[in-house]
Image (cartoon, rainbow, N blue to C red):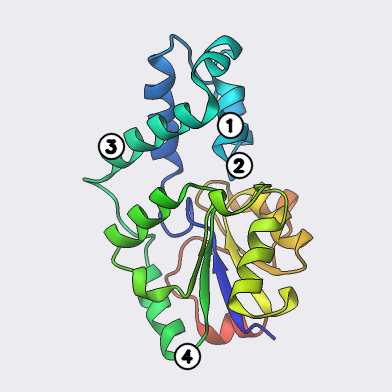
Amino acid sequence: MVKALIFDMDGVLVDNTRVHQKVFEMFCERYGTTIDDRVFASLAGMGNDEIIPRLLPREIVEREGVDRLAEAKEALYREYYAATILPTPGLQDFLQQVREAGIPCAVGSSGPRANVDFVLEHCNIVSCFDVIVSGSMVTRCKPDPEIFLTAARLLGFPPQECLVFEDALSGIRAARSAGMGVVALATTLSVSELEKQGAPDLIIPDFRGISIEAIRSL
């Protein structure tokens, strides 16, 4: 039975995959390079330490360092997204239902803590989460299950009693490796892609219409 919920951030709390791609395109242009859409799609859900070396020339990464490049990219992302950020449709109402039902919640994101705080504050959902796990708190990002296992431990529940909300294949695989159920949002990938490759327990377009009863039955 589901007793705790863990939410990925990008593509789940906010439908921002296109924003991240646009910002990465802007950032890469600074260094005279472009992004292949297929390569970018394959990196969804991963951390900057894996993404940046695949998008920027090796000599730039070695000269600037991944950490410095990641900080600059994420600062650009927050500046670019601040004026238009919105929670995924239905999220705030669903989180309110979850709080009223007394179900503990965590954020489990590969992103940096500054981005998590930025999203929670701008979407006015800070108080909805009991635990926050960001990429800086773990040594291995998704598809490794460490983020979700850490969130479950901090929530105080065994993995099999936790349900993960994800949008990316790497995150779905991480949740499965952790022994958790998965609800997939069709924000980054289509329903057919999720059905074919991710095998989640439930696929939803967003949070409108999903009920506490539905997730408790998973």
Of marks 4 and 1, which one's residue comes earlier in the chain?
Answer: 1
Tag of residue 112:
none
Q: Nearer the viewer, mark 4 or mark 1?
A: 1
Q: Residues within 10 Å of mark 1 (few under 14, many from 20)?
A: some
Identify the amino acid type marked 2: Met
SS state under label 4: loop
Of marks 2 and 4, which one's residue comes earlier in the chain?
Answer: 2
What quarter of the picture does the N terminus occupy?
bottom right
Tag of residue 101:
4
SS state under label 3: helix
Tag of residue 51:
1
Relative side of 10 to 166, left or right: left
Q: Using the numbered discs, state the Cα–Cα distance from disc 3 to disc 2 in whole angstroms.
A: 21 Å
SS state under label 2: loop
Q: Residue at x 72, y 73 (%)?
A: 159
Tag 3 residue? 80
Identify the amino acid type marked 4: Ala
